[in-house]
Image: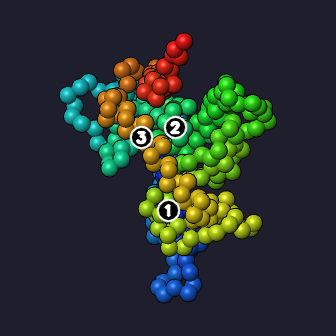
Amino acid sequence: EIRVEMLARNLAQARAAQQAKIDAYDLRRKGRAPAPVEQYSMVKRVRLAWERAVTETVAAHQQSETEPVTAAPASGGGSRRRGGERKRNITDPASRMMPLRGGGWLQGFNCQAVTSTDGLIIATTVGNNPNDATAFATTMTAAVAAATLLGTHQPDRAQPFAPQDNSGGIGILLADTGYLSRHNLTAPGPDRLIAIGKSRAVDKAATQTPAQGPPPPEATPLQAMAHRLRTPEGHALYKQRSHIAETPFGHAKHNLGFRRFTSRGLARATAEFSFHALVHNLIKAINTGRLTPATC
């Protein structure tokens, strides 16, 4: 099921990237026009892989329902061939195989964090689904609740956030292309910018085919987002995402050495990641002098 979800996400990204090329193409320029979305080679290749994965998943479910469960043979029988019996991590069944940047896989969990512009981690979630897009709504809801709580306890704020304000005081959410989906673009909540491609593609589109003003009223959610990212305001805002979002993860991994959980299970991993975010925020507050006691 996870493989099917990952391929579905890749298919959506491939379609979105090709649609962005089509939207940015200028008829006055020389060169071949971009191919239609469903005829693009990358889209066709990923779609075939997704359809094959769906077929294999359905067949595996049907086979597991009809065949009895047999005990695994004793050790010493050699390695299993690919496509043989299923294997499960018996030390941490809740964990899953996660793809690594640059290639490879790691048995673990998918950690999500929402960071404010001043470096505070205001929301965290931990799951065993490698597809980031499925965690967007949950993480956004947690961030809105945290921002609302922070806003109502600020001593210099005359009026707290209204209960009907579904943004929680969040100006705008910035997310990379891993969170791109139609549901995430249109879900209720704060205003957001979700990249429709890699950062270099976003920069190239904003530089070569800049846009002005609001998107056309007949634009689809994907086309509207592509238009906003090509405007000077949208491009300038999205360029801040990498520093805001990636710095806490880089600090945790490289400076604090937090690269693995110390206990097993999804509940314990969630608690440990929340504790790490708490310590991160406390250190941030101490170093900035926010927790320094006033002298009389």
Looking at this view, is 154 or 249 the one in front? 154
Q: Position of residue 154 (x, y in %)?
A: 66, 27
Q: What's under tag 3, amino acid-wise?
A: Thr
Q: Which residue was labeled with disc 1?
A: 202
- C-alpha gap between disc 2 and disc 1: 24 Å
Query: Distance of mark 1 from mark 3, alpha carbons?
Result: 20 Å
Which label sits in the foreground, 3 or 2?
Answer: 2
Residue 18 vertical placement versus 183 (above, below): below
Residue type, numbered disc 2: Asp
Q: Residue at x 37, y 38 (%)?
A: 250
**Which mark's residue is nearer the viewer, 1 or 3?**
3
Callout 1 environment at 10 Å: few (<14), some (14 to 19), or many (20+)? many
Helix, strand or loop status at disc 2: loop
Is residue 271 among what the camera can see?
A: no
Residue at image coords 66%, 62%: 224
Q: Under tag 1, what secondary structure?
A: helix
Would you place residue 118 above or below residue 175 in this image? above
Can residue 106 be seen by looking at this rendering?
A: yes
**Residue at position x 55%, y 77% in the image:** 25
The residue beneath circle 2 is 118
Q: Earlier in the sequence, mark 2 or mark 1?
A: 2
Which marked residue is nearer to the observer: mark 2 or mark 1? 2
| Up/down of 152 relative to 97, above or below | above
Label 2 environment density (alpha carbons within 10 Å; few <14, some 14–19, many ≥20): few
* Disc 3/disc 2 C-alpha distance (Å): 11 Å
Q: Position of residue 164 (x, y in %)?
A: 79, 36
Mark 2 in CB contact with mark 1 (< 8 angstroms): no
Q: Residue at label 3?
A: 247
Q: Position of residue 276 (x, y in %)?
A: 44, 24
Question: Dots 1 and 3: beta carbons under 8 Å?
Answer: no
Callout 3 secondary element = helix
